[in-house]
């Protein structure tokens, strides 16, 4: 079980995450810690249901992670301070989101920072889902990993699937989803009726999956018309690994 410090957080995202979880009384058990890469560029991908997922993964993996987060999180005053304090980087509006993600993610990986991604996107955040439910994965993270590996062949590049399984939680109906249109009118999901669920974890199991190391065959295959299929295969491999970890 992870034990968090009682002192006030510093400006370090990892310490802030630990302090945040300790104050909420969240208990985390971690499986597969020996699978966490100790070297190279690392892209962490995980299922996503709660605003707590980024600090949970940092505390569980025991390292700072630079998470890509939704555009509106960089627009809401208090939330902006919280997410950037934890090392997250808000993405651009939908029409420029992919380019923004690839540009920022590549720069961070080149600096040997670990980057975190929630491939399910915003959908599970505005819907009430089961702890073992995993939605469709967007393949942007796979393109980031493959493009980075192709442009930096001397770097070791790994994609690390991690499963977040809640054993005890509380779900609050926080505020109308349409309120978020004030901060991001470009997001179509914010047009739906209903209240935004807020999942607060009490007891979690974090299972680290098998890292997928981008190899020379991947680099050679990720060319021209075949690039999309290579990215699809990597996306599906990571999703299946996370589904398997949740079922265990």
Image: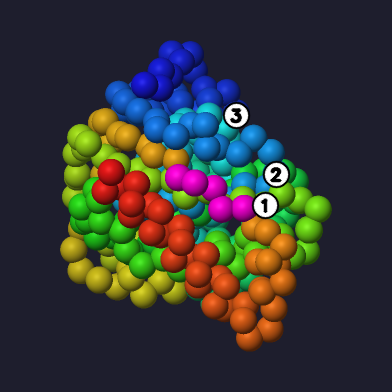
**134 to 82, vertically: above or below:** below
Q: Magenta span has 168?
A: no
Q: Which residue shows up at 40% across the image and 22% down it?
A: 2
Q: Position of residue 148 (x, y in %)?
A: 71, 61
Disc 1 marks which residue? 157
Left or right: 164 with respect to 153?
Answer: left
Asked if the residue under mark 1 is in contact with the one under mark 3, i.e. CB atoms within 8 Å, the reply is no
**SS class, disc 1:** strand
Cα distance between the residues tagged 3 and 1:
25 Å
Q: Which residue is mark 3?
A: 12
Measure the alpha-carbon separation of dots 2 and 1. 6 Å
- C-beta proximity under 8 Å, tags 2 and 1: yes
Q: Are marks 2 and 3 in contact (CB under 8 Å)?
A: no
Q: Quadrant of residue 215?
A: bottom right
Distance Cα–Cα, label 2 vs label 3 = 21 Å
Crowd rating for badge 3 (residues with CA inside 10 Å; few <14, some 14–19, many 20+): few
The mark nearer the N terminus, 3 or 1, is: 3
First in sequence: mark 2 vs mark 3: 3
Provide the residue span drawn in magenta.
209-213
The label nearer to you, 2 versus 3, is: 2
Give the class, few, some or many, for how many residues have Cα within 10 Å of label 2's Cα (few <14, many ≥20). Answer: some
């Amino acid at each position: 079980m992870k034990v968090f410090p009682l002192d006030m957080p510093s400006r370090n995202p990892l310490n802030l995450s630990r302090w945040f979880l300790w104050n909420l009384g969240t208990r985390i058990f971690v499986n597969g810690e020996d699978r966490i890469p100790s070297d190279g560029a690392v892209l962490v991908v995980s299922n996503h249901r709660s605003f707590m997922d980024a600090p949970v993964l940092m505390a569980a993996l025991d390292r700072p992670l630079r998470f890509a987060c939704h555009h509106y999180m960089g627009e809401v005053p208090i939330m902006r301070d919280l997410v950037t304090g934890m090392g997250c980087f808000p993405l651009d509006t939908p029409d420029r989101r992919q380019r923004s993600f690839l540009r920022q993610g590549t720069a961070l990986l080149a600096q040997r920072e670990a980057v975190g991604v929630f491939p399910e996107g915003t959908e599970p955040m505005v819907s009430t889902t089961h702890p073992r439910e995993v939605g469709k994965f967007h393949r942007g993270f796979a393109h980031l990993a493959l493009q980075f590996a192709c442009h930096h062949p001397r770097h070791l590049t790994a994609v690390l699937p991690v499963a977040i399984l809640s054993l005890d939680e509380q779900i609050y109906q926080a505020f109308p989803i349409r309120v978020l249109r004030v901060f991001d009118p470009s997001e179509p999901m914010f047009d739906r009726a209903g209240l935004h669920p807020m999942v607060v974890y009490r007891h979690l199991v974090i299972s680290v999956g098998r890292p997928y190391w981008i190899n020379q065959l991947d680099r050679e295959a990720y060319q021209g018309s075949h690039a999309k299929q290579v990215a699809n295969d990597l996306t599906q491999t990571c999703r299946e690994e996370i589904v398997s970890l949740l079922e265990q």
